Image: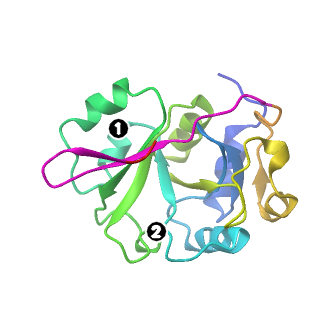
C-alpha cells in the first residue's frame, strides 16, 4: 500500500528523538519511539499533560505485543482477532518496556493497531510507538485534523500528510483489562 508520506522519512524522525503528529486507527495522535526519553518528555510538554498519566503504546501485531508484556491472557489473541473496534488493553508491563513510559505504575495500555498506515510505520521502525490524542490536556479531543490546535503541529517534528482531509468520525478505542480471575473488565466503551 502506498501513502502520501514516505514511511522511511517518518521512521528517520522517530529514530532521531522526534515527535510525530499522525492519524491512528482512532483519532489523530502525537507519538514517538517508546525508547526516546527526550521525545516522550516533549510530548508531555506539548500537551501540558500531567506526568503521572502514562501514554499508551501501539504495536503492529500480537507477536510484537508479547515482547512487551509480562504475560498474555489466553483469550487475548481470540479477542484481538475478532474485535472490530480498536481495543486498548491494560497489561502488566515487563522489563523490556522503558521505565519512563510507566510513570511509576507496573501496567501499560497497549493497542494492536488495525490501521495499515500505523502498522507499516511500526513494522518498519521495528518497535512500538507511543500514542496520545493530539490535544492540549483538558481540551476536547479533535475529531479531525483541521481541529488540532496549531501549536501541536508547530511543535511536532513531523506532521503526516496522509488522511488530513478525512471527515469520517472514528470510534475511540475500547479500554479494558483482565482481573485476577480472568474476567474482562471494560473501562471505556
Determine crowd level at label 2: few under 14, some 14-19, many 20+ residues with C-alpha closer than 10 A: many
Q: What is the spatial separation of the Cα atoms under label 1 and label 2, in whole angstroms? A: 20 Å
Element type at mark 1: helix
Q: Position of residue 91 (x, y in %)?
A: 31, 55
Residue at 83% in and 32% down: 165
Element type at mark 2: helix
Magenta stretch holds residue 185: yes
Residue at 60% in and 39% down: 26
Please name whichever residue, 71 or 87, is drawn nearer the observer in this view of the structure.
Answer: 87
Determine crowd level at label 1: few under 14, some 14-19, many 20+ residues with C-alpha closer than 10 A: some
Magenta stretch holds residue 181: yes
> Is residue 48 rendered to the left or right of residue 4?
left
Q: Position of residue 173 (x, y in %)?
A: 50, 41
Magenta: main secondary structure equals loop
> Is residue 140 rendered to the left or right of residue 175?
right
What's drawn in magenta, residue-wise?
166-186
Q: Position of residue 22 (x, y in %)?
A: 70, 46
Q: Position of residue 18 (x, y in %)?
A: 68, 62
Q: Which quadrant of the structure image shows residue 130?
A: bottom right
Residue 125 is labelled as: none
Q: What residue is shown with label 1?
A: 62
**Image quadrant for the N terminus?**
top right
Please name whichever residue, 70 or 171, is drawn nearer the observer in this view of the structure.
Answer: 171
Please name whichever residue, 17 or 132, is drawn nearer the observer in this view of the structure.
Answer: 132
> Is residue 40 rendered to the left or right of residue 83?
right
> Is residue 72 rendered to the left or right of residue 123?
left
Residue at 38% in and 60% down: 108
The figure's colour scheme reads rainbow
Q: What residue is shown with label 2?
A: 101
Amino acid at each position: 500500500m502506498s501513502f502520501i508520506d514516505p514511511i522511511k522519512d517518518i521512521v528517520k524522525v522517530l529514530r532521531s528523538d522526534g515527535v510525530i503528529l499522525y492519524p491512528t486507527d482512532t483519532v489523530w495522535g502525537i507519538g514517538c519511539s517508546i525508547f526516546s526519553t527526550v521525545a516522550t518528555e516533549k510530548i508531555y510538554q506539548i500537551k501540558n499533560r500531567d506526568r503521572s498519566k502514562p501514554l499508551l503504546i501501539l504495536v503492529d501485531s500480537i507477536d510484537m505485543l508479547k515482547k512487551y508484556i509480562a504475560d498474555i491472557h489466553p483469550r487475548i489473541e481470540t479477542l484481538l482477532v475478532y474485535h472490530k473496534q480498536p481495543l486498548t488493553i491494560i497489561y502488566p508491563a515487563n522489563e523490556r518496556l522503558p521505565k519512563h513510559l510507566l510513570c511509576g505504575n507496573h501496567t501499560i495500555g497497549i493497542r494492536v493497531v488495525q490501521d495499515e498506515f500505523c502498522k507499516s510505520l511500526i513494522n518498519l521502525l521495528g518497535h512500538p510507538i507511543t500514542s496520545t490524542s493530539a490535544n492540549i490536556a483538558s481540551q476536547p479531543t479533535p475529531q479531525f485534523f483541521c481541529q488540532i490546535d496549531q501549536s501541536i503541529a508547530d511543535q511536532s517534528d513531523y506532521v503526516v500528510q496522509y488522511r488530513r482531509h478525512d471527515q469520517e468520525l472514528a470510534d475511540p478505542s475500547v479500554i479494558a483489562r483482565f482481573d485476577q480471575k480472568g474476567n474482562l473488565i471494560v473501562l471505556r466503551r
